Amino acid sequence: MLAPGLNIWARFVNVPADAAIVEVLGQQWHWQYRLPGKDEKLGAVDSKYITENNPFGMNERDPNGMDDILVSSQELHLPLNKPVKILLRSIDVLHNFAVPQFRVKMDLVPGLVTYIWVTPTRTGTFDLLCNELCGVAHFAMRGKIVVDDSTSYGKWLELQTTYAQKLAVPPTNIAIGKKIYATCATCHGSLGEGKFESHAPKLAGLGEWYLKRQLNYFKNGIRGSNDNDTYGKIMAPMAMILRDQEAIANVSAYIKSLPNNPAPTSLQGTAENGKSIFDSTCASCHGSTGEGIKLMHAPRLVGMSDWYLATQIRNFKLRYRGSHAEDQYGPQMTLMANMLQNDKSINDLLAYIAIIPNNKPMPTIKE
């Protein structure tokens, strides 16, 4: 058994000389990818450089990294019939890169770079799973590997962004964003405080990155296209007035500048019950105080409109939201939302989130 095993192992660890290089970055609970640019060299990275704006830990001083292609998505494309060496990095805990059809898998070990190599032999879309128990949302850590013919792969590659392009994002103009926001204020309020009567949630307090993503989702039909998402369908045409990414960036920057006053609560629930729900389902991504974590792609919850959060949880549960093929993080939220069994558990959860902002004492439950 050992002799043939060593033969197979030798084939497993010895990578073809002409193999392309792809880096896979795993973290709780999603995947990202890095490919070398025209110089065919990956730039230097280091965990000490990792921030919410630099999840790959890129070294700005290394010129080899400027043309690196950074894919901040759950979906990686690979070319057909070409060997590829897949470098594996984790920035938090132990993960495992597993595509069942590849017939090989490998752990991502913090502090190390492991690898596998494959030669995709047929086109298609294949599920990428984490086969290592990595935390509460381990089951939701799913990506996609798309194997393309050379033409389709080239088109996908052209649409990706290099590290240098990410660094060269022009500054936003809050004054212009304020003018654009005048249209939004009709429903969302002059200070982004939200209006229940307009079914428009509070916006102030949300991160620019999240606002940009949602506005793009509405513009591109990724969100608000489901016939059962009543209010999402109202928002979709409003997002179309933002003609380009510059307009989206400007209005998002203005909203960020608005005062973040907690929205009034409107739901009744038992906060004591909600704390255990929050700790087991929400805190790992959205933060222990619901502040939102950009690195986890999870928006702020604390101080936001509770009725809106309740509506969105139900939309995820019913797949009115998060089911679009291009919604990168919606499927994760759908899985997590299904852990909330009924409206009572939703209301209890939101009752607990409502007491976080001012560190209000936990209400006493009377017998």
Image: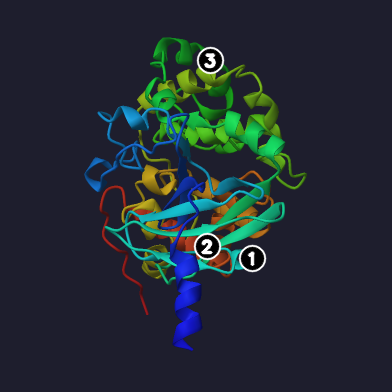
> Which residue is at a point 71% across and 55% down the rendered structure image?
122
Disc 3 residue crowd, few under 14, some 14–19, many 20+, Cα 10 Å: some
Kindly identify which numbered label has been placed on residue 140: 2
Whichever of callouts 3 and 2 sits on the residue coming sooner in the sequence is 2
Give residue 43's quadrant in the image. top left
Q: Which residue is mark 3?
A: 180
Mark 2 burial class by Cα count in 10 Å: few <14, some 14-19, many 20+:
many
Can you say whether 50 is above or below 275 in the image? above
Q: Which mark is residue 101?
A: 1
Left or right: 342 as drawn, with respect to 360: right
Looking at the image, residue 333 lies above or below residue 249: below
Element under label 2?
helix
Cα separation, mark 3 vs mark 2, equals 37 Å
Which class describes the residues within 10 Å of circle 1: few (<14), some (14-19), or many (20+)? few
Mark 3 residue type: Ile
| Element at label 3 | helix
The answer to whether marks 3 and 2 mark residues whose Cβ atoms lie closer than 8 Å is: no
| In the image: residue 256, left or right of residue 326 | left
